[in-house]
Amino acid sequence: MSGQPTIITVVCTANICRSPMAEGLLRHALDGELAPPPFLVESAGVAARDGERASQNSITAMKRVGIDLSRHRSRLLTAERIARSDVILCMTTSHKRMIETLFAKDPSHLRLFRDFADSGSSEVPDPYGGSLDEYVQCRDSLLDAIPGLLRFLYHEVFPPTKK
């Protein structure tokens, strides 16, 4: 193994609700693996303003499952970020299409986050401006995709380990 981390970028619109929650959940899941390969999970938004805090309801919804988003600051999705990402996971088909249209480099692993869920829509509705219950539902829909996403990462993305 080269030792270089696999970079996973999670994308939504403003990088203050869905993608920070997905980033936190995926990082937490990977950190919990017995021997995870080197990885970096980050997030960005197709229309983000750099430096914004995660929404309070996102912070609260994630705190309820033991994940702290209070230090999160939003980042704009850039060509540089796309180029260095090994995997890009979008919240909606429109985010995926924007990346395909706006950026020359077509990432090899550009998918929807919920492509890996066992059932339900592959789209993650935006809870922005909604109630805490809507954020909790969003969080839970992201959480539902984690087991399948881990299978995908270990079978398709992470370098095989030598035994």
Image: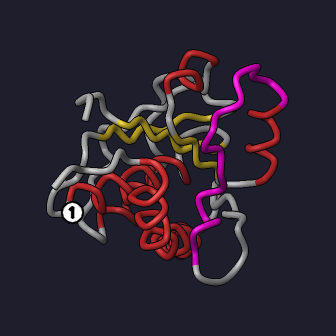
What residue does disc 1 label?
33
Name the residue furthest bottom: 119
- Residue at 55% in and 54% down: 18
Residue drawn where x is 41% and y is 64% of the image = 150
Magenta span: 101-117
Q: Is residue 16 above or below residue 24?
A: above
Foreground of the two, 131 or 63? 63
Q: Is residue 29 left or right of residue 149?
A: left
Q: Amino acid at mark 1?
A: Glu
> Front-most of 10 and 51?
10
Question: In the picture, which quadrant includes the C terminus?
Answer: bottom left
Q: Which one is in front, 115 or 43?
A: 115
Q: Measuring from the top left, give residue 152's x and y in whole percent.
A: 49, 61
Q: Is residue 116 magenta?
A: yes
Q: Residue at x 80, y 35 (%)?
A: 98
Please determine whether, in this image, residue 83 is positioned above or below residue 125.
Answer: above
